[in-house]
Image: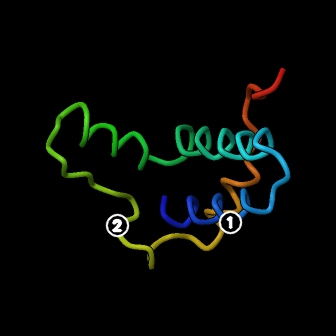
Amino acid sequence: ALVVTLDAVREARAMDSVRDALAGEYRRVLWFVHNHPDLVEGIRAQLVDKDRDPHWDPQTLAELGPDASAEARDYVPPVPLWA
């Protein structure tokens, strides 16, 4: 999540509109929900079980695939944000 979030912040800085930044955020959030367990795991640890002990996958940045950020950035949501 750290790598994808940092990429999102850097990309949003260069955008000309809030609309474009929100569309990028929407793509990434849906990528996390559909393809990556960390978002759901963080919610579980903080809000559901309240154990504050998330089990991240991967556990370290070194284990993260090199294309994760690009996958999130290029994800095409099944439902567009702006209809």
The residue that mark 2 highlights is: 59
Residue 80: x and y in percent read 78, 28
Q: Amino acid at mark 1?
A: Arg
Question: Which mark lies nearer to you, 1 or 2?
Answer: 1
The quarter of the picture where residue 4 lies is bottom right
The residue that mark 1 highlights is: 10
Q: Secondary structure at mark 2?
A: loop
Q: Secondary structure at mark 1?
A: helix
Residue 70: x and y in percent read 71, 62
Answer with mark 1 or mark 2, whichever residue precedes in sequence.
Answer: 1
32 left or right of 41?
right
Identify the mark at residue 49; answer none if there is no mark.
Answer: none
The quarter of the picture where residue 51 lies is top left
Image height check: is 74 above or below 50? below
Q: CA distance from mark 1 to mark 2?
A: 24 Å
* Quarter that holds the C terminus: top right
The quarter of the picture where residue 43 lies is top left
Which residue shows up at 28% across the image and 37% down it? 44
Image height check: is 68 above or below 21? below
1 left or right of 80?
left
Question: How is the protein colored in the picture?
Answer: rainbow
Which residue shows up at 50% across the image and 70% down it? 64
Residue 7: x and y in percent read 64, 65
Which residue shows up at 19% across the image and 52% down it? 53
34 left or right of 42?
right
Image height check: is 38 above or below 59? above
